[in-house]
Image (cartoon, rainbow, N blue to C red):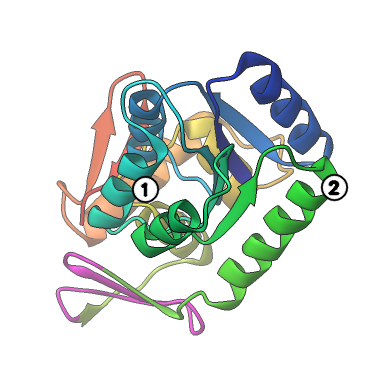
Amino acid sequence: MRLLVVEDDAQLGDLLLDDLSDEGYSVDWAQAGDEALSLLESFPFDLVVLDVMLPGLDGFSLIEELRHQKNNVPVLMLTAKDQVADRIHGLELGADDYLTKPFALGELRARVRALLRRSMNEGTNHIEQGRLRLDLASRLAWWQDAELELSGREYALLEYLALHPKAYYTREMLLDHVWPGDSDISPRTVDAYIRFLRSKLANDAIETVRNLGYRFKG
């Protein structure tokens, strides 16, 4: 699971980074709202721990922009404000949970686990991205309403890309997900499978971005 911590307080941010990493999560840390938005538009995250009071783009504005972009990543908001009106405002903008500073790290960990469980349980069995439609239960795919003939690896790669269409994936990230634990697989294998998928979809369906990786465009 990949988490994003958005916290401008260096001491607290470092503490959260270490604590959540010790729990086994892959954790990124942004210290400003604009930096966090850029990360969220470029990479897939499973949950965001978001402070309200941030330089530049504040937490309320950030979550409002995320929901405007149809990004439904679970958000746990952190704030020193303890007024009911502020908590209501954050929840109405799309926050999934709220934690008021100061808080116990044990409670933060419990809320993170609960949000991740809820997110997985609420997941849909179908994905539609542009010209692509996936049935996650049957592992079937359609492109412009025509059913695709895909190998198991091709489907796994396509599903992973389509789940986060705005995100860039490096070869290493794709290898870790589609070929986990297989040290004999070369990163160039990813390039070959991308070519296979493009031949079955369209050349512009998957974008290559130099120094960043691949992105699904649909």
Residue 30 place in picture, x, y as percent: 50, 24
Q: CA distance from mark 2 to mark 1?
A: 24 Å
Q: Is 168 left, or right, of 139 in this rendering?
A: left
Q: Is residue 149 above or below residue 92?
A: below
Q: Nearer the viewer, residue 7 or 218?
A: 7
Secondary element at image label 1: helix
- Asked if residue 167 can be seen in this view, the reply is no
Q: Is 134 left, or right, of 86 in this rendering?
A: left
Res 10 quadrant in image: top right
| Magenta part of the chain | 129-145
Res 32 quadrant in image: top left
Q: Is residue 132 magenta?
A: yes
Q: Is residue 194 magenta?
A: no
Residue position for label 1:
63
Q: Amino acid at mark 1?
A: Ile
Residue 176 place in picture, x, y as percent: 62, 41
Secondary element at image label 2: helix
Q: Is residue 107 above or below residue 174?
A: below
Residue 200 place in picture, x, y as percent: 24, 61
Residue position for label 2:
106
List the single residue furthest toward the bottom.
138
* First in sequence: mark 2 vs mark 1: 1
At 60% across and 77% down in the image, what residue appears? 121
List the single residue furthest toward the top.
10
- Which quarter of the image is occupied by the C terminus? bottom left
At 49% across and 21% down in the image, what residue appears? 31
Residue 54 place in picture, x, y as percent: 43, 26
Q: Nearer the viewer, residue 213 or 42?
A: 42
Q: Is 80 left, or right, of 142 in this rendering?
A: right
